[in-house]
Image (cartoon, helix red, strand yellow):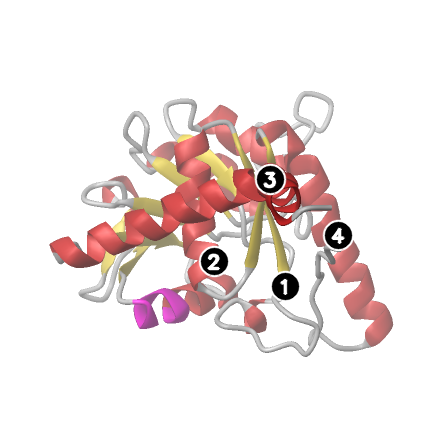
Amino acid sequence: MGFTVAFQQYFAQTRGQVARNLKRLVLTHLLNLLGVVVMITIVGAGQVGRSLAQGLEVLGKSVRFARRQPELAQEVGLQRCAVGSDYVILATPFMATGDVVPQLGLETGQVLIDATNPFGRGWPAGYNGADFASGGEFVQFLAPQAHVVKCFNVIGFEHMNKPQFPGGKPFMPVCGNQAQAKALAMNLATDLGLDAVDIGDISKAALVENMGLLWGALRDVEGSRDFAFSLLRS
């Protein structure tokens, strides 16, 4: 096979991923050139929220937490969390989503990254497994004006910030209905050292959340949290 033909075949197979990576790189470079500081508000100050905050601050993002009763200067109330935010990350227990998400004041087209999993300490108000196939779809229902993206929910909080595994970068599936919103979330995940892959619209959230369940089962079997999923490519 000639070099030209081989290159054309390779390019045809990889151009989609190359184009997505290029868009993310260009966006990041432009923001850096313009001196734009990205503001990210994290709803939920537990282990997941704080781990993401630490990693994002290292990347030069401005991070604040949203709480019902803010106490510190870098905290805001739930109703004001969307004001001035480039992204909002939902990192509460899933049980709290039915009460919390409607209070966030999300604007039309605002990006809400959903890092929750629909298991744990009960169901949120208004959630019915018969009506919603996934927690991600429930969050989108609660915030129809926002672009909900499922991300950051198939790995332990200890490894969300530049994880170092001998097998390579941990796999991070991403899904949502809006392409640009997904690209922004994937950019964050990639910068944090994860192998972010777009798997489709928000209806794929059930698959992602089941991976979260599988991660929990493996944690119990292994007796450790020091592992992650990996996507092997030939």
Give percent across and percent down for residue 94.
57, 46
Give whichever of discs 1 and 2 has the lower sequence position.
Answer: 1
Give the residue at mark 2: 190
Question: CB atoms at circles 1 and 2 under 8 Å apart?
Answer: no
Q: What is the CA distance from the residue labelled 3 to the residue labelled 1?
A: 30 Å
Q: Quadrant of the C terminus?
A: bottom right
Give the residue at mark 4: 213
Give whichever of discs 2 and 3 has the lower sequence position.
Answer: 3
Give the residue at mark 1: 170
Give whichever of discs 4 and 2 has the lower sequence position.
Answer: 2
Question: CB atoms at circles 2 and 3 under 8 Å apart?
Answer: no
Chain part drawn in magenta: 54-59
Give the residue at mark 3: 8
Give percent across and percent down for residue 48.
51, 63
Label 3 neighbourhood size at 10 Å, few (<14), some (14-19), many (20+)? few
Give percent across and percent down for residue 73.
18, 65
Q: Amino acid at mark 1?
A: Pro
Question: CB atoms at circles 4 and 1 under 8 Å apart?
Answer: no
Q: Residue at image x 42%, y 67%?
A: 50
Q: Amino acid at mark 4?
A: Leu
Q: Amino acid at mark 3?
A: Gln
